[in-house]
Image (cartoon, helix red, strand yellow):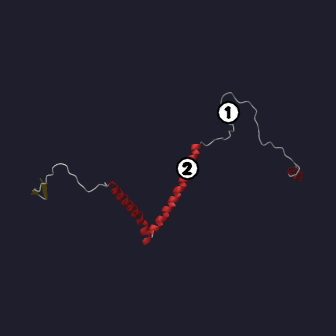
Amino acid sequence: MSDAEAAAEADRILTAAYRPDAVQHIPTSFRDDTPLPAYGPTPPVRQDDQRTVPPWAAGIAVASIGVGAGITGIGCGAWLVLQGLASVTLTSVLMGTLPFAALAMVATAIGGAISNARSAATKNVHVYQGSVTQNTRVTNTSNQRGMFARTRNDIR
């Protein structure tokens, strides 16, 4: 083929390819109708993904997102508190000791309330039944040997 013929053929091919009314019917898929073997390897078959998420898994996912967001908020709060404690000023010292003082005050108030509730509301009249014996004799025994001394007082 000469150069003139090759140029004419190329011009014809390009004109035919880029013609606006040219509709090209090119197959986009292929179906193989040959029968499958009764045994042995078979060709792969497309299987659509139709998985469903169980409700408990979705609940765990939502809960983990919530826990993560909550922990992030707690971490930011702790960071702010620690930033306040890092600068040693009167405010930071008060910020550090105020919760402990509040807890001590609450514990003291609860202890006082329990103590008052447990005390009996009786009259100061003591009623004794039986005989009372009062001994005022004190015996003192003392063992002083070695490095340690021991004194024992017996009231009889």
Q: Position of residue 36 (x, y in %)?
A: 71, 30
Image location of residue 134, percent across then percent down: 13, 54
Q: CA distance from mark 1 to mark 2?
A: 44 Å
State the residue at coordinates (57%, 48%): 61
Report the side of 68 relative to 20 (left or right).
Answer: left
**Vertical side of 141 occupied by 85: above or below:** below
Crowd class of label 1 (few under 14; some 14 to 19; many from 20; radius 10 Å): few
The earlier-in-sequence mark between 1 and 2 is 1
Viewer-nearest residue: 104 or 40: 104
Give the quadrant of residue 57: top right
27 and 133: which is toward the camera: 133
Residue nearest the viewer, comparing 9 with 70: 70
Given the image, on which type of amino acid does mark 1 rest? Thr
Residue 89 visible (yes or no): no
- Horizontally, is 86 left or right of 122 in the view? right
Q: Any mark on residue 42, and which?
A: 1
Instruction: Check disc 2: other Cα within 10 Å, few if <14, some if 14-19, many if 20+.
Output: few
The x, y position of residue 150, in whole percent, is: 13, 57
Residue at left 35%, top 59%? 112
Going 40% across and 63% down the picture, which residue do you hit? 100
Question: On residue 63, which mark appears?
Answer: 2
Per the image, label 1 sits on a secondary structure element best described as loop
**Residue 82: percent from left, percent from top:** 46, 65
